[in-house]
Image (spheres, helix red, strand yellow):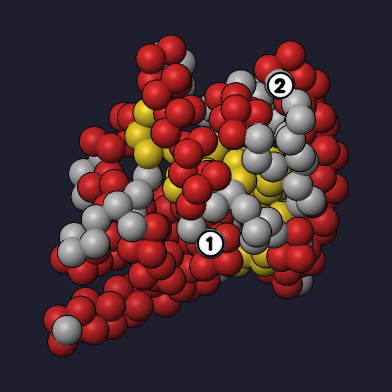
Amino acid sequence: MGYLYEILACFCIIFVVVSYDRTPDILRMGTFLIGSTVFVLIWIPIMIFTPRNYRNALGPATCCRDLCWLLGFTMEVRGLENLITKSGAVVVMNQQSVLDLCVLAHLWPVIGQATVVAKRKMLFIPIFGFGAWLWGTMFTNLSQIPDSIEMVQKESKAINEGKCKLLLFPEGTRNSEETLLPFKEGAFHIAVHSQCPIQPVVISKFEFLDSKTKIFTPGHAIIHIMPPIHTKGYNMDDLDRIIKQTRYVMQAEFTKLSQEAKDINSKDRSHLFK
């Protein structure tokens, strides 16, 4: 394990150097991407002994949280009292950028047995794709009917029998705007089919990250685990109503949290202009 500590020490030094406010944005983002990949690579020899186990993500998640902190990017998790613990659930989250990895890193230790559903193309990302497979990520294409049917059947059983949490991004793609995109049906099909609750999780807008102008400054984000939306007793005829209800409560919370986070970030950066 000696080599592990030496590698970590080297990267910690690099991360401290680039964590200052005046560090070029591209260097900060590059450090995050490279660092995240290296940490997954370090943990693969350990994870490979227990493949497809959600606990494999705990080590990389810890490293990812520390990396974000060193780069000046912090998060807080609220609503732990709303967390579903006595049954499985479909967890739906808004999606913004590659920094969603930090969101997952903060949720993983508290959410329990969980599986992330990701696009199949992510499996082929060097190193990271294999690491994600080792910690149980399900790679699929919900737009293809055979994949959808097979996934609904498999995951409904896992949710009900194993009390598993299935994490999905219902927008289907990254979105950095003020308004959430229309939700796709896949996550809600699974929830209704398995008669399990939906657990909305809302992340405030990453207003310190602008993919268009390539601005990535230190900042703070808020993750809120919201009260569950129950589906027991509903059927596919109620699907549209459930989707609209979920999106409505998530949009309202997204707007609220984003404003709060913006105020926090503005206050934290005010010293730069004095």
Location of residue 266 in the rendering, given as x and y in whole percent from the top left corner = 77, 60
Q: Residues within 10 Å of mark 1 (few under 14, many from 20)?
A: some
Location of residue 33 in the rendering, given as x and y in whole percent from the top left corner = 35, 53
Q: Residues within 10 Å of mark 2 (few under 14, many from 20)?
A: few
Q: Tell me which amino acid carries mark 2.
A: Asn
**On the rendered structure, is 84 left or right of 49?**
right
Q: Disc 1 vs disc 2: Cβ atoms closer than 8 Å?
A: no
Question: Residue placed at 24% from the left, 36% from the top?
Answer: 124
Residue 52 seen = yes
Question: Residue placed at 18% from the left, 60% from the top?
Answer: 48
Residue 28: quarter of image: bottom left
Residue 45: quarter of image: bottom left
Location of residue 6 in the rendering, given as x and y in whole percent from the top left corner = 20, 83
Question: Residue placed at 57% from the left, 60% from the top?
Answer: 111
Choose mark 1 or mark 2, whichever is in front.
Answer: 2
Query: What label sits on residue 112 in the rendered view?
Result: 1
- Give the Cα distance between marks 1 and 2: 27 Å
Location of residue 144 in the rendering, given as x and y in whole percent from the top left corner = 41, 14
Residue underneath mark 2: 235
Closest to the observer: 253 or 244? 244
Q: Tell me which amino acid carries mark 1.
A: Gly
Q: Secondary structure at mark 2?
A: loop
Closest to the observer: 230 or 141? 230
Above or below, 221 relative to 181 = below
The numbered mark, 1 or 2, whose residue comes first in the sequence reads 1
Above or below, 191 relative to 81 = above
Question: Residue placed at 74% from the left, 35% from the top?
Answer: 232
Closest to the observer: 256 or 219? 256
Q: Quadrant of the C terminus?
A: bottom right
Above or below, 216 relative to 47 = above
